[in-house]
Amino acid sequence: MTPLLASGSTVIQAMIDSISLGCLYALFALGIALIFGVMGLINFAHGELVMIGGFAAVYLSGIGQPWLALGIVGCVVVAAVLMERVAFRPLRGAAPATILVASFGVSIVLQNAAQMAFGSLPKSTNLLSGLSTAYVVGEVSVPKLAVATVVITVVLVAALVAFLRFTDLGIQMRAAAENFPMARLMGVRANRVIATAFAISGVLAAAAAVILVSQTGSVTTTMGVNVVVVAFVATILGGAGSLPGAVLGGLLVGTLTVVLQDTLPLELRPFRDAFVYGLVLAVLVVRPQGLIVSGSRQLRV
């Protein structure tokens, strides 16, 4: 009985860890998927929005936790809107490849600006330290931060779906994603819709930053690189332009990461990410359109 119980608790623990990590990855992917759905742009500078949220958490930590979340969200949303206004709006009529290169350029500029402003050494913080403990049920440990991660993700996803389905601006955003020229002829204001999409991606990036920094306890100028890789892979795996696909892709990548971390031999665990992305590649070879088909570029919810 003991081995069976131990095996069962191990599986349950892996499921809890998978859901928690998958929800974090889903937040990463949603920001990428939203901008792609509206503009057809894979914003490789999205990871730097998470980085900005991380540094905001470090340098605003003295204002007290009740106001800290609002401060982080405010900083990241302002950065996201400025990113759209300064870097992407002037290039809106350019070729997709030009805008893609611009997103790489914005990413590199923000990384180097952060290094000049804050240095290249990691900054430590004890963000959400009250969630560092865990609920223990038998042999299963449920970190309070994991519970908070799931709750935050569910609330944000539900709020985003409600916004896109039931508000005038959300409906305009969906219409623009399906056929932007026709939507503009019908009176949809492109600047307003795209700026709103970037602002929402900023909210998602801020939430992801809070969770990620609370998990790791540190902030670096290059932390956005891994974020955007995971977000891009999850978005393409789920189906570009599909918000449910982004969530599904994030959950699957998170689950694969946890399962392989637990099951790979010790000598192969340093290569875990290679196995994860190899399995993702295998799925895309079989289903190149992603797991949820969303049409050419429709913002599906």
Image (tube, rainbow, N blue to C red):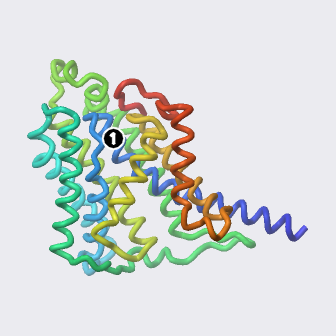
Whether residue 249 is visible here, answered yes or no, is yes
Q: Residue furthest front?
A: 267
Residue at 52 percent across and 42 percent down: it is: 281
Assess disc 1: are there few (<14), some (14-19) or many (≥20) residues with their C-alpha within 10 Å of its C-alpha: many
Give the image location of residue 193, x and y in percent.
21, 36
37, 278: nearer the viewer: 278
114, 104: nearer the viewer: 104
| Left or right relative to 255: residue 244 | left
SS class of the residue under badge 1? helix
Whether residue 67 is visible here, answered yes or no, is no
Residue at 59 percent across and 74 percent down: it is: 134
Give the image location of residue 4, x and y in percent.
85, 64
Quarter of the image where one finds residue 224:
bottom left
* Number of numbered callouts drawn: 1
Residue at 21 percent across and 45 percent down: it is: 101
Give the image location of residue 6, x and y in percent.
80, 68
Quarter of the image where one finds residue 125:
bottom left
Quadrant containing the N terminus in the rendered view:
bottom right
* Residue linked to disc 1: 34
Give the image location of residue 158, x and y in percent.
44, 44
244, 40: nearer the viewer: 40
Quadrant containing the C terminus in the rendered view:
top left
In the rendered image, the vertical position of residue 109 relative to residue 158, given as above or below:
below
Residue at 14 percent across and 33 percent down: it is: 94
In the rendered image, the vertical position of residue 194 relative to residue 20, given as above or below:
above
The amino acid type, in three-letter code, at marker 1 is: Leu
| Left or right relative to 235: residue 59 | left
